[in-house]
Amino acid sequence: MRVAALLLIPLLAGCTYGAPAAGAGSGAPAGGTTTTAATTTIDVSLTAATTTATPYGNAGGFAPVVTNVALGSMVRFVNVDSFAHTASSLNGTSFPASSPLGASALNVAGATLSGGWTSGTLGAGTGSQTLLADKAGTYLYGCFFHYGSPMRGAIVVK
């Protein structure tokens, strides 16, 4: 009887009530390979970037100035200089002549590119939340503090 109980323990361990079936929800497709969304990092630096003409207007302060990413990937901003910056989404298909960003750009908001977002204030050496490239399109953004420098960029999701 004791031997039978010991043999049942491993079998019952795989049948825990409420637990997902083996292999379910693991994020791994059949075959065992784990797939994760790629994360693209955009460097934020007023001092290292030059002004570049883009299809959306002059931009700079972010590297790359125009970032191409695949649908479903993630984007993160990292401040690599000593000034505070933001990376905050803009509406429209070209950069406005003057900054449309208000004080709300100073607080972290958003998780998807299509939903509108801001990194909030990024101190030296800090990074933003990761943003999901959830819909194809072009997403313009700028820095609250240095928009006129012109500290602006674009993310193109394909």
Image (cartoon, rainbow, N blue to C red):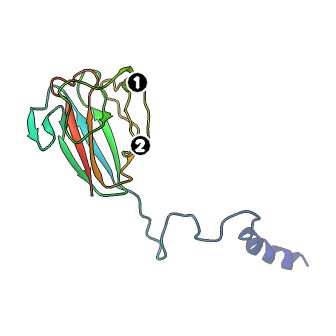
Q: Is residue 77 above or below residue 71?
A: above
Label 1 SS: helix
Callout 2 amino acid: Gly
- The image shows residue 95 at horizontal and vertical percentages of 20, 34
Q: CA distance from mark 1 to mark 2?
A: 15 Å
The quadrant of the picture occupied by the N terminus is bottom right
Label 2 Cα neighbours within 10 Å, binned few <14 / some 14-19 / many ≥20: few
- The image shows residue 47 at horizontal and vertical percentages of 15, 25
Frontmost residue, 32 versus 55: 55
The quadrant of the picture occupied by the C terminus is bottom left
Callout 1 amino acid: Ser
Q: Which residue is mark 1?
A: 104
Total labels drawn: 2
Which label is found at residue 158?
Answer: none
Q: Which residue is mark 2?
A: 115
Residue under the point 44% across and 65% down: 34
Left or right of residue 112: residue 125 = left
